[in-house]
Amino acid sequence: MTATFLLEIGTQELPAIPLLTETPNIKPKFTKILEKYRLSCDFNFFYTPRRLVLLSKQFPTIQKSQTLEFFGPPLSIAYKDNKPTPAALGFFKKCGITAQEATTITKEGKEILYFQKESPQTPAKDLIQAITQEFLESLNFGKSMRWGNHKESFIRPISWILCLLGDSLVPLHLYGIESKSQTSIHRNISFEPQEVSSYENYFEVLQKGKIILDSNQRRKKILQEIKAIQDKRGIKVEIDEELLEEVVSITEYPTALFGEFSEHFLELPPPCIITSMKVNQRYFATYQNKKLHNGFVMVSNSLAEESQVIINGNIKVLKARLQDALFFYRNDLKNGLNPEKLKAVTFVEGLGSMWDKTQRERQIIKVLAPLYQKYFKSQDFGLTLEILDQASSLSKADLMSEMVYEFTNLQGIMGYYYANALGYESHVALAIQEQYLPNSEESPLPSNLINAFVALAYKLDNLFGLFSIQKIPSGSKDPFALRRAAIGVIKILLHFELPFDLHKIFSLLAPLYRPFDLQQLENFILERLDSMLSFNTSLLRAVLATGERDLLQIYQKLSTLDSVLKNQDKALLMQTFKRVANITKEVNLDSTLEIKTDKLLASEEIALYKAFCEYEEKCDTLSYEAQLENLLALNPLLSRFFDKVLVNAPDEDFKNNRKNLIAKIYKAFLKIADIKEISF
């Protein structure tokens, strides 16, 4: 038997970000609770800023039946002298039965006490109180609050509870609230509770009361009205998805409205205006002819017919915000970019000030840039070094600006605008802007090599500095985002195809920091490489086993292994080539591995030697892919060699000759990977 089910938890206005963070977890949590109470069913979840709603058209009216099995001790332990022992008595008590009601069953060759019974089926209406309480307590919005004299806490005070099973009210008492057949509608219509007579009537009441329950419908309404504004005004509205989700979550009947601010505020850099509108007012920015326009779109939750009053009020508030921003901007330009002020700002305890950090980044660039001179393709490398040094020197100066103090997410971005306005070289300004890239999974990379080196210096200093004072990520804790920094380093190196030998580079940078275990940092970066790539982990292990520590070479070899091995008979390959590795265990691979041709007697070893010699003649000109394909092509010859030729021949010369031949082939593989480490 099933019935319709409606549970509405009415609250005071829910804050958008915590609500949106927890929303994806709500259905899984309620599903798990229903499973626990044997009331599993399909249901939908909806929310507005004043309500959390769970709906089902086929909610079980009684628990699903369940067979309970109880397994007791073996009979040899359960009874002594035909009398039940404490072990048996404990089993009877657990099952709630007498000794006569117990049966036996054979399990794992032993006869044991056994009891089976059907679990009682409780009506759903008697369980909904416990289900609802458990559900509400499972929700994690971050911070919660208490109100009145209640001990329970929730993200916001609960104002009403509506719960219907079929058309009947389910009596609930939670958080000091008694459930009633009532809901609330839009405040512009009425503050009075509205009676709800049935599941179907609930939707009628909300519709008449201007409550759009489905967030997807609210989103659709906003986008349709924004499109209408665009078409009417000849502008383009920038749809910030994060902002859109937020305004959807804080409105019950959204209406998109257009307003304009004074054009003289366009003196401000666009990010200042956009950030001020988004962060402070939740407005969408508008563009005309690909330039920021002095218009904005706001989303109102009001039903007022005279929308101009609302628009004028928002314009007034925005004007005050932009006046402050313009004051900050002009002040910052007067003060200029002065890195010396960073001496007053602590970076991390134990690593000095932000000025100290800047100086270390400058040193990193001075150490590394000359190693990559040919990659810059600059006619005047001295000038390139000057640009790099000036960019790194000024990179954090905007942290002392009033604008960045107000909007911290504009660090780097404001440095770019200030550097341009103050007449610094355009390359310097752009490098300041891109110094933090990439700063997220979907983030773009620095647009050129100069910017890439400024970004590398920033991330490498974070890694070296924090590892040197033992601020190392553990478990899920990574307060300084060092995992992101390591992934950023790897992405930049691979994108610009820069060789980066961890041993070599780390030894060059280590003197800039207090001593620490460089191997720990190396392992940390290699772990990030493994986590960000989708290759078989054993391939990375095989490449690293060769001693390769150049990140670019590691990636290229990994790509080669993954690509070439995909279309091979992996089982056959591993059987043959692991035998190659095993045979050469006692061979000194650093020796000359001399092959005496007069000791090659069997046709199989002659054919193998000839094929390998042909490979050796051309291997230096081959790509990793061609090298690996040629080596794998030796597989049939190797198989015949192992089948027909006795490697451990009685004659020492023949044995050494054959082992040397196999060792040379194994050594050729080691230029790419240690094949014995590969597994599938």
Image: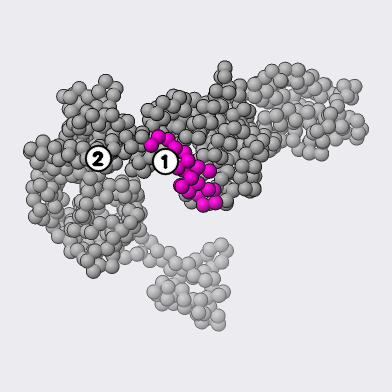
Quarter holding residue 326: top left
| Residue stretch rendered in magenta on the structure | 335-356
Amino acid tagged 1: Leu
Residue at the spot of label 1: 399
Side (left or right) of 416 relative to 256: right
- Alpha-carbon neighbours of circle 1 within 10 Å: few (<14), some, or many (≥20)? many
Q: Secondary structure at mark 2?
A: helix
| Residue 165 screen position, x and y as percent | 19, 56
Residue at image point 78% right, 38% down = 585
Outermost residue on the front side: it is 334
Q: Is residue 628 magenta?
A: no
Q: Secondary structure at mark 1?
A: helix
| Residue 560 screen position, x and y as percent | 60, 27
Quarter holding residue 554: top right
Q: Which label number is shown at residue 321? A: 2
| Residue 587 screen position, x and y as percent | 82, 36
In the picture, which quadrant includes the N terminus? bottom left
Residue at image point 55% right, 80% down = 80
